[in-house]
Structures are given as structure tokens and as C-alpha cells.
Amino acid sequence: KLPKSLSRAARGFDLGAQGPAEGSAMKTRDRIIHSATELFNDQGERNITTNHIAAHLGISPGNLYYHFRNKEDIIHSIFDQYARHLSESFTPARSHEIKLEDLMGYLDAIFYLMWQFRFFYANLPDILSRDEPLQHKYLKAQEQLRAAVEALLRSLREGGIIDVSDEDLPDLG
């Protein structure tokens, strides 16, 4: 369960909330992604195999391989989910001037997202060194994040919350 103090934006990234509404069955593919993320976070990505994931779910390895060719495919799907959430949580509101409360919501969402996908942060250089396509996805996501942070900082400047020059924005983004 999520802490009540977390912003609504951050609460939307709960791994437990990724499946369909309560009472309906989560698809096997989604269950694999969810369980793999939990296991990677709890025990370290290097320590978990596809057999561990299948056993944790009570499914056969063949059933897992029907949905994913290998562990790297699972990691790519988890990363895609992470990148999508990252992009959504750092999209500046265009309809109004950003206030300090909005910034706190962004920070809540980002820190909670980092917690939900902490295995990436714990072992990022190793994961990326083994997977060049994932490395490209990561660099693209980071560039999009940098641009979004710069836009957010501009909005904060326009709202009088921070005082930063145009030349300093790229360094802060």
C-alpha cells in the first residue's frame, strides 16, 4: 500500500496498480512483468533467471517463453514501462503556470518511480553494458527527460519560483 502523503501523480505508478481493476484477472504477460520487477528489485536483476520468475508465478518456463524470448525481453518491457511513466510524470502542465505545489508533485512522482524501478538504478551500468538496444532506449529516454526538465525549469522561472538564466538551464536540465 502506498503512503497517503504521496501525491496523486506518484500514486499512479504503484506496481500493484498496474494490472486491471480488482476482481479481474491480470494477463499473464503483465503478471510476468510485474513479478520480474518485484524480484529484480528485491533480489537483484543478476540473481534472477526466467526460471525464478516462472516459479514465482507458478507457471511453466514454456509459458513464460511464449510471452518473452528471454530475460532481456522482459527487461526491455519493464524499461518501456519505466520510460513511459517517466515521460508522463515530467510532462509540464501547459494549461496553467506551474506552482511550487506542482513541483512537489513532480518530485513525489519521480522519487516514487525511482523506487518502483530501483533495480535499474542499482545496476544500470551492468544492464546497459550487456544490451546495446536497451542502451539506445535509455539514452533516448534521458534526452527526452532533459528536455522536459528544462521546460519545467522555464515554467518555474516564469512563475517566479526560481531565478535561473537561459545559459544555466541546460546544466540544470
Image: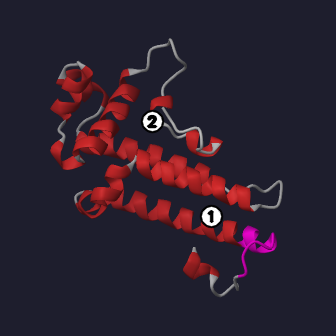
Residue 92 appears anywhere in the view: no
- Mark 2, secondary structure of its residue: helix
Instruction: Say which mark, if any, is on residue 130.
Output: none
In this picture, is 10 found above or below 128? above
Q: Which amino acid, by three-letter code, is at mark 2? A: Leu
- Identify the residue position indicated by label 1 in the image: 148
Q: Residue at x 25, y 36 (%)?
A: 69
Image quadrant assignment for residue 128: bottom left
Vertical relation: 5 (above or below) 172: above
**Which residue is found at the position 45% from the left and 30% from the top?**
16
Q: How many marks?
A: 2
Give the percent coordinates (x, y) of residue 91.
66, 55
Residue identifier under label 2? 15
Foreground mark, 2 or 1, reads: 2
Q: Amino acid at mark 1?
A: Ala
Rendered location of residue 108, percent (x, y): 57, 52
What span is in magenta? 154-163
